[in-house]
Amino acid sequence: MKKKIVVVHLLNDYSGSPRVLATAITGFQKAGWQIDLYTSKGPGFLSACDGCCLWQMPYRFHENKWMRLWALLRVQLWLFVRLVGRYRHYSNSDVVFYLNTLMPFGAALAGKILGKRVVYHIHETSVRPPVLKRWLRFVARHTAHHAIFVSRFLQKQEALKGVPSSVVYNALSEDFIRQAEQYQQVSDMRRPFTVLMLCSLKDYKGVAEFVALAARLPQFQFELVLNATMEEIRQWFALRQIEITDNLIVFPAQRNVHPFYQRAHLVLNLSYPERWIETFGMTLLEAMWYGKPVIAPPVGGPTELVQHGQNGLLIQPKDIAQLAHAIELLAKDQSLYTHMAAQARISAQKFSIVHMKQKIVETVGEVPTQLLERHGRKRFSASDRSGSTHTHSFLINRPE
């Protein structure tokens, strides 16, 4: 009988965590597993999951916090009832529950009741309100058999007491890498120097700061891709009375982001560390695969991708003066720019998609002690076997 994996992700959109999940799913499929995918209606990276048994959940994001809370609680109940209700189907199968992010706690509770292996793939640290985060961590500690973290920063920050954990760095899909490798880097600066940022439509993502930079540097072109509809974008800017300058173009959510990276010279991430600590930075990695230098906050996961002064710069997102100076410097100093661009591509190649999928499949598929008993492998330390530690370093996809 084939192994079955129940994959759960609440909000299907074009953000980083569903993108990573879509890549992981291809690894599960290659391993020959049957996949039940539970997620919200699209559009998003999970909308076209060929070969998956798709269950669409009644969930969407609301700006109003009370409606958002109600939607979250309702979908957890839906998940719990639906999954427990399929106990006959799952009880006769070798089933693993794979939860993408901390949010689907209803699925974790169902997996616990059904006696199934539950694996969390944790991407986030900035969960609000704090009471919700405490609840999510409580459920994870009492239901998870293993936790996968997307960076060592996140593993240290959000370690679940008593739960074995590993770090598997994110990587990009084979299709994205193939298109990026076909791109021929522009070697001169004769075309307009273009600064790009792709992010969610949130205050703490630094949207206002990006607009301010465009106003401060009218000699450069700025492009902003927001994970929202055009109507939502218009309302957001109108509510905050933010004016868009002539050198800034704002785009709604895009499934194909390759043309933006091809036009860009520089890619920014301006998330506020005090409100939203980036735990990895998928847009940074995408930019680096295209040989584009990046600017990111000097906190969290980006510090594991960006070497300051080598493949990019680490600058506080609210320091508009320093950000503007850095942009001007990279635009004028072609020697410095060329060096950073080359180092960005070299750094990106260290994040292996093959390694990522292999380690996720291995971690989700079997308990490490079972692997040890079955194959007699020597790669577990004495502390792992004795149970005195819960971190399996062999799973760390670490750039050298």
Image (cartoon, rainbow, N blue to C red):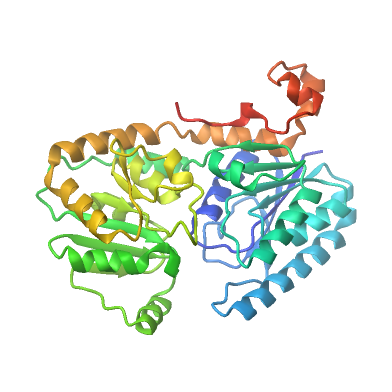
Residue at 84% across / 52% down in the picture?
Answer: 112
Could you say where residue 191 lies in the image, as x and y percent from the top left? 12, 52
Could you say where residue 136 lies in the image, as x and y percent from the top left? 71, 58
Q: Is residue 345 above or below residue 322?
A: above
Q: Is residue 292 visible in this depiction of the protein?
A: yes
Image quadrant containing the N terminus: top right
Closer to us: 341 or 55? 341
Q: Is residue 11 above or below residue 311?
A: below
| Left or right of residue 375: residue 335 | left
Could you say where residue 390 lies in the image, as x and y percent from the top left? 72, 33
| Left or right of residue 212: residue 2 | right
Image quadrant containing the C terminus: top left
Q: Is residue 98 above or below residue 217?
A: above
Please identify the quarter of the rendering in which residue 254 is found. Answer: bottom left
Residue at 37% across / 58% down in the picture?
Answer: 270
Residue at 39% across / 51% down in the picture?
Answer: 297
| Left or right of residue 349: residue 388 | right
Residue at 71% across / 59% down in the picture?
Answer: 134
